[in-house]
Every structure is written in structure tokens, then in C-alpha cells.
Image: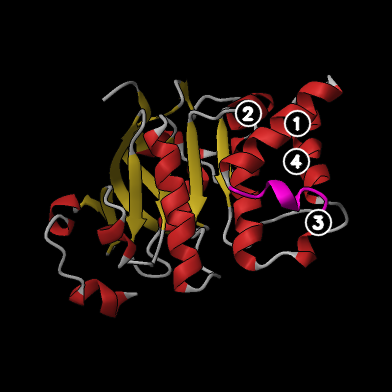
Amino acid sequence: MGNRLIDYKKVNVYQGENLILNEADFHVDEGEFVYIIGKVGSGKSSLLKTMYCELDLNEDEVEEASVLGRDILTLKRKEIPALRREMGIIFQDFQLLHDRSVKHNLSFVLRATGWKDREAVNKRIDEVLALVGMEDKKDKMPHELSGGEQQRIAIARSMLNEPRLIVADEPTGNLDPETAAHIIGLLREISLRGTSVVMSTHNIEMLNRFPGIVYRCKDGHITDVTQEYTHLDLSEDAEEN
């Protein structure tokens, strides 16, 4: 594979005072499609939050933690926006701004990240909406869209600055199975174009339809279990999730 975009070695992750992942080893290379599975509370979301510096790591309890070439242990607060500009972040609840149209949701992000030329802004909005098949929804308000459509807009938003990495926290958690499959298929397509995707999910049956690298968070540890999912036995995890 290409460059290493995330490299975690012996990383301890806390939720408040509780150690939730102990000495986690985890890495993502360019163009990889990576699932993180596990029960609620097993540390999936917390791990993702450390990647975009929503959750701090304790320097004394980490051997290495780099994201997009930056040491996140020594990253200054003022450097975090630049890091986040190189990644797309997608949430379970979409987090669209409800007081403005799809177009204005997207232009808000572009202007906030330094785009000034109106023509360039409009062109980029059209490009990302075409990517997710939502060109005809540009002037709609979020409440006029279905859950699946809102999540497509959230994916379009995450692609605006051509990120090297997309971090998606349970992106299909609020969607029906058919819509969920469309969303994961879309993220898989994005990874095939070279953008790495790291996604937490409880949607185990998708691992068969859209194969990728699989890590499991369980009992305070994270383990690469990709081999288990090349000959899928869903029974244990179907019970877990």
C-alpha cells in the first residue's frame, strides 16, 4: 500500500477516568477501507475521536500516535484545524445545519476553510454532490431530505477539501438496511479512488458485501480480525451487536 496515514503503537484510550482501550496498536495506509467493530462502549467512538483530536491522549501512556504525518501528542491546539482540513468526518446524526439549504451547508464549510472565489466554491459543491448522486437536492433544506439523503450530503461535505482520510462514526446507525448498504457502498467507492476510510459500525453483515480490513474492540483491546471475515461466520458478532 501507499503511505501510512495513521500509526498508533501502544496507545491507551480513556473515557473520563476509565481506561477503555489498553495498548492499542492500529494503523491505516493510503486507500484502505477499515472497519472497527465491537459492542457499544467498547471504545470504537473514543478511538475515532482521538484521530481528530476531539479526545486527548496522555503522552506518558503512548508509544506513538501519528495522524496524517503529525504527532498528535505534541500537536498544538491552533494546529488542529489544519489537521481536520485534511480529513473528512462523518457522524451518525449527520450534523447538518438545519437553518440553511444543502448548498449553503457546503459553502459554509468551504468558506470556513479558506475558499474565497464564489465560482470555485459553486463548482466544488456541484462536484461533490455529483459524487454522491445528490445534484438535484442542492436547494433543499435538510428537513426535506430522508435520513439516507442527509447522510449522502454529510459524505459530500466530508469530501469538499479532497481529504486523504475519512473518519466515519457509525455512519449507518440511523438508517434502514437498504439505505445503509448504499452509504457503505459509497464509502467503499471513495476508498477505491484513493481516500482512506475508517468506519466504526455495528452493521456486521456489511463486512461481507463490502470487504475491508476489520478491527474488533473487545475487553479493552483492539485486534485485527480481518481473517475471520474472509470466511464470514456472523453468528458470534450478530449476537454481540
Q: Position of residue 119 (x, y in %)?
A: 82, 23
The span from disc 3 to disc 2 (Cα, nearest Å) is 22 Å
Label ID, residue 110 = 1
* Residue projecting furthest to the right: 99
Residue shown at 40% from the left, 29% from the top: 194
Label 1 to label 2, Cα distance in Å?
8 Å
On screen, residue 24 above or below 112? below
**Residue located beneath label 3 in the image:** 140
Q: Which of marks 4 and 3 is in front?
A: 3
Which element type, helix, strand or loop, lies under badge 4?
Answer: helix
Q: Name the residue under label 4.
A: 106
Circle 2 residue: 161
Place residue 81 in its image quadrant. Answer: top right
Whichever of labels 1 and 2 marks the residue nearer the N terminus, that label is 1
How many circles with numbers are drawn on the protein?
Answer: 4
Quadrant location of the N terminus in the rendered image: top left
Query: What range is drawn magenta here?
Result: 133-139
Residues at discs 1 and 2 in contact (Cβ within 8 Å) = yes
Q: How crowded is mark 2: few (under 14 residues within 10 Å), some or many (20 or more)?
A: some
Disc 1: CA contacts within 10 A as few (<14), some (14-19) or many (>=20): many
Name the N-terminal-most of marks 3 and 2.
Answer: 3
**Residue 8 visible here:** no
